[in-house]
């Protein structure tokens, strides 16, 4: 059985396991135990504890319904689970987003700063989708460090706004796009 599907706007084709030698030896997807708590527990990476699964993020509304702008390979389970969701498009639609605004930097901005890895050309969320469904990669440590740094900084900003009686839906949307529920303080 193929572990990944090739994802593109016009077609989804199965990529055979033998084409994925660099993923060989991986356990089957969802091999980790997921606790029913506020944070997701990956038993092999207890230092990485997001609060939303990729499907939950897309269902709630992220990236204006057009995250995947570059063709890529994605886990077949994600393709199956997301078939009714908006994943790609030409222009972001803020009404699709959970907080009704567009937030975050563009893919071009991330590429200009050389923060995108070739294996995940659409960025962090693509990395997270693959990680969630079982892929382990040499970029995991860097991505988890980025995640923790982002969540820590943005929660501090949000708590600062809240202490002044203000709200920031932009910060809340950004946290959602990094798989974090703004109401939860991290346990790390």
Image (cartoon, rainbow, N blue to C red):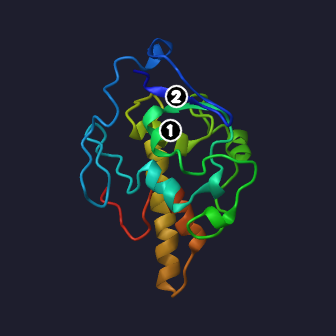
Pointer 2: residues within 10 angstroms few (<14), some, or many (20+)?
A: many
* Residue depicted at 53% across the width and 44% down the height: 83
Image quarter of the N terminus? top left
Is disc 1 placed on a helix, strand or loop?
Answer: helix
Residue for badge 1: 79
The image quadrant that residue 119 belongs to is top right
**Residue 142 in sight here:** no
Residue for badge 2: 5
Q: Is residue 56 left or right of residue 90?
A: left
The image quadrant that residue 152 belongs to is bottom left
The image position of residue 136, as x and y in percent, is 40, 30
* Residue depicted at 44% across the width and 22% down the height: 2
Residue 142 image label: none
Q: Nearer the viewer, residue 114 or 87?
A: 87
**Residue 74 in sight here:** yes
Pointer 1: residues within 10 angstroms few (<14), some, or many (20+)?
A: some
Q: Is residue 71 left or right of residue 53?
A: right
Q: Vertically, is 26 above or below 55?
A: above
* Residue depicted at 47% across the width and 69% down the height: 156
Q: Are marks 1 and 2 in contact (CB under 8 Å)?
A: yes
* Residue depicted at 60% across the width and 63% down the height: 97
Q: Is residue 182 left or right of residue 173?
A: left
Say whether disc 1 or disc 2 marks the residue closer to the N-terminus: 2
The image position of residue 103, as x and y in percent, is 65, 62
């Amino acid at each position: 059985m193929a572990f990944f599907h090739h994802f593109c706007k016009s077609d989804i084709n199965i990529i055979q396991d033998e084409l994925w030698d660099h993923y060989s030896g991986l356990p089957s997807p969802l091999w980790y135990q997921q606790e029913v708590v506020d944070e997701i527990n990956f038993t092999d990476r207890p230092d990485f504890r997001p609060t939303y699964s990729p499907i939950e993020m897309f269902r709630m509304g992220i990236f204006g319904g057009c995250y995947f702008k570059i063709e890529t390979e994605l886990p077949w389970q994600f393709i199956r689970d997301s078939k009714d969701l908006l994943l790609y498009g030409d222009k972001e639609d803020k009404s699709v987003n959970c907080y009704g605004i567009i937030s975050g930097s563009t893919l071009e901005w991330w590429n200009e700063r050389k923060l995108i890895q070739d294996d995940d050309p659409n960025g962090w969320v693509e990395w997270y989708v693959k990680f969630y469904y079982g892929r382990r990669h040499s970029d995991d440590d860097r991505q988890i460090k980025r995640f923790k740094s982002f969540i820590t900084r943005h929660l501090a900003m949000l708590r600062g706004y809240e202490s002044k009686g203000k709200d920031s839906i932009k910060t809340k949307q950004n946290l959602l796009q990094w798989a974090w529920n703004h109401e939860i303080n991290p346990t790390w």
